[in-house]
Image (cartoon, grey):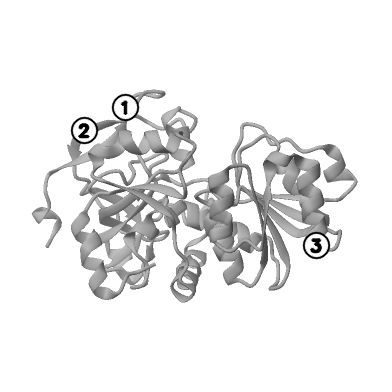
Amino acid sequence: MGIEDLPKKMKAIQVVEFKQPYQINEVDVPTKLQPTDLLIKVAVASNCHTDGMVQQGVMKSALPQIASHEGSGTVVALGSLAKERGFKEGMRVMCGIPLHPCGKCHDCKGPESHRQYCMNIKGHIGVTTDGCFAEYVIADSASSTPLPNEVTFMSAAPLACAGRTVWRAVLQTELKAGEWVCIVGSGGGLGHLGNQFAKALGLKVIGVDARDEGLELSKHYGADVVVDARKGKEAVVKEVQDVTGGEGADSSIVLSDHEDATSIACGCTKMHGVAVQIAQPDEIKIPFMEIIFRDIKIHGSLICSAEESVRMLETIAKHGITVTSNPFYGLDKIEDLVKMVHSGKIKGKAAIVIDEQQVEDEKKIGAKY
């Protein structure tokens, strides 16, 4: 099948006006590919916290814009450089978010863990360019990742951002097997993955969450110790110190937007330790005593690079890491998805199955995680 055989129109969920509900519209199928591009027939696309920021106008996206930067599907057409990179039609992939980096700046030239930070990039799918809540999407082969047979489309969609983000956060702690990591916000969409990634790398996990659903999910996904943040910072820090010989966790990861989350993470981290900040509140609030008197370092982190993404998927396939998903079938279910996300009761990630046939067909190759 070539591009000329594809339909001319497709359904898509768009942000048409900031601070207003999504609209489902019929739009042109994108067919103008650059040499590095992949045209992907989307199987599953999921919702992320950043989608709300796009909808509110925080990202200053040009409208109208197709939503969702978390997608997975099958390559149906590709550019010449994408072929040279080993991609081909029929390949199952996890969509890359960065689109058309410059390839010339100091970040693009490496090290590998910096390549995703190109400041001269054309855009990021679903954030500043059209995204995955559609039947087809264009993604960049430089940031997209082939899927192992074991990894499902349903898992791969949220892994495209949530997985890549928390995987890099765990790597950025630079901890060794047997050391303690404290994850604040351990029972959310990123947190339940962070628990599993940390355990797969041999770390001991302290999960901190403030919701019954989050505490339950933290336990389910292997946190060695689970602490209820509703007890307050002082009580949380004491519980962490009690299980770590009075020193605190070797490092911490902040996944919660709560105004006290980073303060709690720093308090739970041992002297001279590192707190990796992933959450994106308007302001990050930390008592000066944590920074000055205890020498806690704050390390910001975004998504991981292409090669780090490959290692993440290999780890998932090897260890059987799973994603808790709440699937909705069809683009017309977007309102139901949004209601669940805003209910505060969601466990894991909310996703839309856009192409049920792809999801059914992958069972034949043993996709199960």
Mark number, residue 16: 1
Q: Earlier in the sequence, mark 2 or mark 3?
A: 2
- Image quarter in which the C terminus is found: bottom left
- Image side of residue 152 versus residue 186, left or right: left
Q: Would you place residue 26 above or below residue 269 in this image? A: above
Q: Quadrant of residue 10?
A: top left
Asked whether the beta carbons under mark 2 and mark 1 sit within 8 Å of each other, the answer is yes
Q: Residues within 10 Å of mark 3 (few under 14, many from 20)?
A: some
- Residue 368 in picture, x, y percent from top left: 35, 69
Residue sitting at x 42%, y 59%: 143
- Image side of residue 71 versus residue 199, left or right: left
What is the CA distance from the residue labelled 1 to the residue labelled 3?
Answer: 50 Å
- Residue 92 in picture, x, y percent from top left: 29, 65
- Residue 276 in picture, x, y percent from top left: 67, 52
Amino acid type of disc 3? Answer: Thr
Mark number, residue 106: none
Secondary structure of the residue carrying tag 1 is loop
Question: Along the line of sight, which residue is nearer the eye, 337 or 2?
Answer: 337
Asked whether the beta carbons under mark 2 and mark 3 sit within 8 Å of each other, the answer is no
Number of marks: 3
What is the CA distance from the residue labelled 2 to the residue labelled 3?
Answer: 54 Å
Amino acid type of disc 1? Answer: Val
Residue 224 in sight here = yes
Residue 167 in sight here = no
Q: Earlier in the sequence, mark 1 or mark 3?
A: 1
Q: Earlier in the sequence, mark 2 or mark 1?
A: 1
Residue to which mark 2 is pinned:
25
Question: Along the line of sight, which residue is nearer the eye, 147 or 179?
Answer: 179
Amino acid type of disc 2? Answer: Asn
Q: Would you place residue 168 above or below residue 260 in this image? A: below
Question: Along the line of sight, which residue is nearer the eye, 318 or 126?
Answer: 318
Residue to which mark 3 is pinned:
244
